[in-house]
Structures are given as C-alpha cells and as structure tokens.
Image: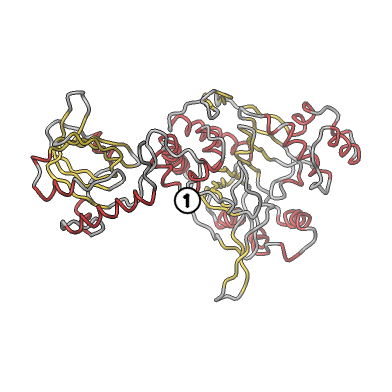
Amino acid sequence: MEKTTSLHELIAFRRQKLQALRHQGFDPFSDAAAQFADARSIKGVVDDFLEGAPIKAAGRITAYRDMGKSCFLDISDISGRIQIYFNTKELDEATSAMAAQLDIGDFLGVEGVYFTTKTGEKSIRASRLLILSKSLRPLPDKWHGVQDAEICYRQRYLDLIANDASRTIFKQRIAIVHEIRRFLEERGFLEVETPMMQAIPGGAAAEPFKTHHNALDRDFFLRIAPELYLKRLLVAGFPKVFELNRNFRNEGVSRRHNPEFTMLEAYWAFANFEKMSELVEEMICSLAEHIGVGLQIEHRNAEGTIIRTINLQRPWRRATYRDLLESALPGWFQLNLEAKREKCAQLKLDISHCEVEFEVTQHVFEKLVEEKLMDPCFVTHVPKELVPLAKLHGKDPSSVEVYELIINGQEISPGYSELNDPDLQRERLEQQAGGEKQCLDEGFLEALEYGMPPAGGIGLGIDRLVMMLTGASSIRDVILFPHLRF
C-alpha cells in the first residue's frame, strides 16, 4: 500500500531542501532577488515573444516536469504563465544542484532566450536560474484548486494561486474601478478625498462603528457615507466631484452585505436625478463592454448551468415605486397600517423589525418587487421618509426626486436631485433623528446656508456592481479579504 505523506512530513522535507540550498550557498530569502526587479509581468513576457531574443522573467513555479537531464517547469503570476525549459548539462554545477532542490510554489528568476517547443508552445530556454524565495508549505492541487469556501475567503492568496475563476473576477474588478475613474474624469469630474473618521456619522441611515481619538480625547465614527463632505465641496464651487471610498456599517454580514464596502459617490452641480440616471446607465454599459462581458450577462450556478441572463441593452426601464408595488400587490396603498400588517402575515413576511408604516411598505417592496427585478430598472419617486437628503417631488410631496437602480434583484445605485434648501434640510434631518439635536451635522447645515447649487448625486455600490457584471453569487467572491465570523 502506498504510504500517505502528511502535511507535517511535507513541510519537514521542504525545510531540509532549504537547509541544503543554504549549504550550497543559495539563500532563498536574501536580497539577491533585486536583480529581477525589472522583470516584466508574465503576460508582458508572453506578449513580447520573439523567437531567439534574450529575456528575463520571474514568477512562482506552478508546474514541474523532471525528465532526467531535461526539465520543464511553469512560472506564473496573476497575469499568466509561461513554460521554462532547461537542460542540467547546459547549467553550471552549482545551478544544477540548486535546481534539484526546487519545489512547486518556489519563486524563480530565469534568464535565457525565447524559443518554441516541438508542440508549438511559446517557452524560455533558460541559461541561468536563481531561486528567489522558498515555499515551505505545499500549494493546493492545481487541478482541483481550493474547494473549501472558508479557505477561499480566509486564505485568499491560496484561492488566487489555484483558482482561475477567482483570478479572473479580481482582475475584472481592478479593470472596473480603473474604467470608472477614466469615465468620470473624461466628463470633467474631479476625484477628491473626504474624512473616513467623522465626529457625526451622516449621509445614510445606518449603524456606525465607533472609535476614540486619544489626542483629541473624543469619540469618532467610521463613515457610513461621504455625502455631507462632498456636498460641502459643491458649496465651495467644485462643479463635478467624485470619490471612490470605503464605507463602514456595523450591521449584518450576508451574501449581499459586508460591513466594510466600496462605494462610488459623485455630485454634479446644476444636474438632477434624471441626468444622473443617464450618467449611470451609460457608465455601467461602458464598463460591461470594457471588461468584455458584453450587454447580455449570464449568471451560472455551481454546476455551470445558466440560471439567468441579465440584459443591459439600453434604454433601461423606468417605473415609479408606487406603480411597481401596486402591480405586485394591488390595493396596497388603500390599506391602513393594521390592514397592511395583516396582509404581511398572510404573505408570511416578517415585519417585526418595522416600527412605522413606511418601513412596512419598504419591506414589502424589497420582497415582492426588488428581489424579482433582474434586468435594470430605475425605481423613481420613492417615499420621502427613505431619503431625507433629496428634493421633494414637485407634484407629489410624499415622494422625492430619486431613482433607485435595481439590477440582479438588489439595489446597485441610488441617485437624487439633492436637497439644497437649508431650512427644509434641517427639518427633515430632525425628523430622521427623532428630535435628537446631537445627531445633526451642524457644520453641514451651516454650509448649506452659504448656498449650495442645485445638483444631482449618485451612489454606486462597487461590490454589488462587480457581482452583477461577473456573475458572482456572493459579495465575498468579489472582495479580496471579506469579513467573516470567527
């Protein structure tokens, strides 16, 4: 019976190789690696292939095929892989001895020339090898990747080494963020930075994280949104601003929620929520085309079966909050609060957390409407209680000039015609705070009194956007290091 080698034995064996390397005069953790600092990415190496040309490359060994004197190995990084060939008879004695101590997972520097193998594979024929770092633990099996979801999230580096799908998602995320910046800057928006620690958390209704500043001897809060500071910049005369920021909300952890998340917020002086909806529609379609997923986005289950196709073809649907809810539940708005609670009980909707009528209605909307909207839909004119920072609708003062963009059954982006009346803004924030004056950001209200131009504003949840564009089923799949329960 074949003996099973334990992880402890494998690590011990690799440590023996480390000692052998040092005995031979090779220290895998020395600063000798700096001579490969100018090596290009593996993708760059592959893209610049020219038969017979000299080349220098460095990467992690992800495959090793020892055929006696002839050896083939792959070196890789996040951008790709390339095959390396060497013949031990063509190397000096010290390098040949070093090569015998190599393992999958080690980092290797290579100098040689480009050549094409008999099978037509672009490769490097190595004339010089140098170990740059020793892997003391074996990597996951490359054929099966990392199967355990907990390991994927807690040890993301292993997931990225072993799983092509994960690498693709995060490379797409990087491209999405880069393209958002390019898109906005081309349209005259200026990228700015606002405080992540705030004396008064504002800009959204959410539970903040609290910390204490020792030098100032006062409590601060990690921001739940940058909105109130970005609007100060509108007051200052910035006509178009945006921030790609981290927000923090001390709330639930789920498939769609992470307590630390990335948000785009942008403000456009003299625009309104309709102009912002056009901007977001154009931007998301541009992103989909740029990263190569197109406007028909397939979402698949774990077995690879298509479960839905999201159609981003323009123009996107626009419908009012009230009309959508009436279509799903006719007569809802004719019911009093008690009758609405009874209806929720019939529908088996848990509204125990809803204290007032608009919260009951919003919960019903989320369950019966929002979760069923897969293709893009701008839900407009939502109840004013939900958005105290937006302008009232001129013809219906019970609603506000707002869109909520729903795609893939969840809100991707809200957009407002921003409220710039300082007296009305104070009144609505007081209503939201339940009369607690200490919850008001007096600095923001004072800034409004100096005059803020009419403006449109948007938020765009980057994590949820990446989920939609890549087909990821969980927010944890698009955040490199998500928060997990311990």
Residue plotted at (51% across, 35% down): 283
- Looking at the image, residue 476 sits to the left or right of residue 131; the answer is right
Q: Which residue is mark 1?
A: 191
The answer to whether 188 is drawn above or below residue 289 in the figure is: below
Q: What percent of the width, then of the height, locates residue 58?
A: 24, 45
In which quadrant of the rendered view does residue 377 lie? top right
Residue closest to the eye, 247 or 256: 256
The answer to whether 218 is drawn above or below residue 13 in the figure is: below
- Looking at the image, residue 10 sits to the left or right of residue 70; the answer is right
Check the picture and name the quadrant holding the C terminus. bottom right
Q: What percent of the width, then of the height, locates residue 143?
A: 38, 33
Q: What percent of the width, then of the height, locates residue 285?
A: 51, 30
Label 1: which secondary element: strand
The answer to whether 293 is drawn above or below residue 424 in the figure is: above
- Looking at the image, residue 377 sits to the left or right of residue 187; the answer is right
In which quadrant of the rendered view does residue 90 lie? top left
Residue plotted at (73% across, 39% down): 382
Any part of residue 51 in sight:
yes
Name of the residue lying farthest toward the front: 1
